[in-house]
Image: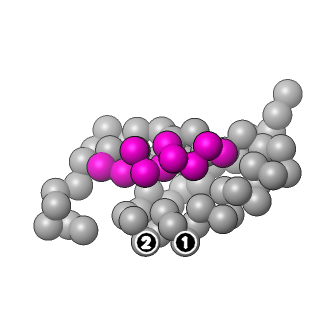
């Protein structure tokens, strides 16, 4: 059974890009990496094949980012 890691940084674009290498590190160690994200950024996080995104069920208004 794989160990699980959860990235608790449901930020916006910059936060996701800066934190993605941390997720990759844990994935390379064999962890299943889960990451709660705002709905606006699910598509972006899905592009990282080593991350399993979790919808927060919240979309940010475009003026928030």
Q: Please report the bounds of the magenta region as a residue range.
A: 40-50
Residue at image x 49%, y 43%? 46
Circle 1 crowding by C-alpha within 10 Å: few under 14, some 14–19, many from 20: few
Q: Which one is nearer the viewer's eye here, 12 or 6?
A: 12
Relative to 64, is 29 above or below?
above
Instruction: Name the side, left or right, on which 6 lies relative to 57.
Output: right
Give x and y (percent) for residue 50: 66, 45
| Quarter of the image with the C terminus in it | bottom left
Mark 1 lies on residue: 18
Q: Secondary structure at mark 2?
A: helix
Give x and y (percent) for residue 51: 61, 45
Instruction: Name the side, left or right, on which 16 lies relative to 51.
Output: left
Q: Which one is nearer the viewer's eye here, 49 or 25?
A: 49
Q: Which one is nearer the viewer's eye here, 24 or 34?
A: 24
Main secondary structure found in the magenta portion: helix
**Mark 1 and 2 residues: CB-CB less than 8 Å, in contact?**
yes
Mark 2 lies on residue: 14
**Residue 12: quadrant of the picture:** bottom left
Marks 1/2: CA distance?
6 Å
Q: Secondary structure at mark 1?
A: helix
**Residue 61: quadrant of the picture:** bottom left
Give x and y (percent) for residue 26: 76, 54
Residue at image x 51%, y 67%? 17
Residue at image x 51%, y 47%? 47
């Amino acid at each position: 059974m794989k160990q699980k890691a959860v990235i608790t940084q449901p930020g916006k674009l910059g936060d996701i890009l800066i934190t993605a290498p941390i997720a990759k590190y844990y994935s390379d160690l064999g962890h299943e990496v889960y990451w709660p994200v705002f709905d606006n950024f699910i598509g972006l996080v899905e592009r990282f094949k080593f991350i399993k995104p979790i919808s927060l069920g919240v979309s940010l208004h475009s003026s928030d980012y």
